[in-house]
Amino acid sequence: MNMGSKKVLLLYISEHSGHHCATLAIERALQGLDPSIRTMNINSFNYTNPILEKIINRAYMGVVKRTPEIWDYLYDNPSVLKNTQKLREIIHKFNTGKLNVLLDDFKPDAIVCTQAFPCGMIADYKKSFSLDIPLFGVLTDYAPHSYWIYNNVDAYIVPSEEAGRKLIDDGIDPAKVNVFGIPIDPKFRTSVNRDSVFKKLSLDSRLPCLLIMGGTQGLGPIKEVVRLVDRLSADVQIIVAAGTNKRLYSWLKSRHFNKKFLAFSYADNMDELMQIATVVITKPGGITTAEALTKGVPMLIVNPLPGQEAMNTKFLLSEGVAVKAECPHDVPVILEELLYNYDKLNVMRRKALSLSKPDSAINIAKLILERVGK
């Protein structure tokens, strides 16, 4: 079997997103298992509808910031799903020409989608052109929504048994459902030496370390949380990962803080930062959640976005691996309680590790290689 000739197309939407992180993790895992494999990793929305992508991204950010209850209503609403079906079919049809060029040029042996929009687009394309290419739908949140449901998806990868059951209840063949977890960079599988990380960052390994972040884009009330945490009576160290939020990073670098403080822009050492974190204060995006579980770090959730993040929060709270602050001003009280309750922190750590699926990207890559090797 000549694995070297195999080609895998990976599709996501939005450049700085968990969906993109997931395709990168799968791509790295594929290349680690078979260095000769050829991959193409594409922002499908930008490729097919560059102008529409800008409009929708702007509209989405506006809605979740100003009127989150609207997104809450739209998310996985059966009537919205039904009423937008014709529109989605028109968009898929409109994209056919560009997809034709892409697929004819690259000739993939498998297609992997980490977001429902490209997954639906490829599923419809397969149906229209009787195309026999294995299509993998990789979910990056703990609650699957109905936009994932298509007959022409050959395998689904889900984060949990519960997510798998939801797909099966919606009519997906159980044989297609694989509970592998959310794909994160394979480097998270390796345990990093905590003392060497503390030393490298000039931090004190004897003091609690609080990691504050807002996903890839550095979203959420991070400035407010930082100000409040900096006034804690407990002796702590603070690390803030600002992601691609340049304005936030500039603000952090221009301020003086009482506590020992480190600010990162786009951190490529998140595995190290989570390894030394006592608690991560964050919004619960799927990738962040999967990384935190793998490193066994308890989560303090602040301002989850409606829809997918609200569902992720529900899952994490029910599993006892996270606590939630209703508003930023609750953060110091909850933190003080956690930091003085080592038993509770240790229980949360153990539960997080038991839920984690560090081999997810590797297992997804193995499944893909098995299918294309047939």
Image (cartoon, rainbow, N blue to C red):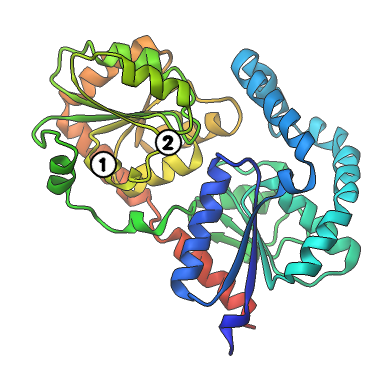
The answer to whether one can see residue 180 in this image is no
Residue located at (60% from left, 66% from top): 39
Q: In the picture shown, does residue 168 fall above or below 6?
A: above
| Residue that mark 1 sits on | 349
Which amino acid, mark 2?
A: Leu
Q: Nearer the viewer, residue 242 or 190?
A: 242
Residue located at (22% from left, 10% from top): 231
Which amino acid, mark 1?
A: Arg
What element does badge 1 sit on?
helix
Q: Residue furthest bottom?
A: 1
User: Residue 319 appears at what percent x and percent y?
Assistant: 39, 39
206 relative to 134 in the view: left or right:
left
| Residue that mark 2 sits on | 316
**Which mark is first along the chain, 1 or 2?**
2
User: Residue 49 appears at what percent x and percent y?
Assistant: 79, 42
* Image quadrant assignment for residue 191: bottom left
Q: In the picture shown, does residue 233 fall above or below 71?
A: above
Q: How far apart in space, not on screen, are marks 2 and 1 (Cα)?
A: 12 Å
What element does badge 2 sit on?
helix
Q: In the picture shown, does residue 109 fall above or below 223?
A: below
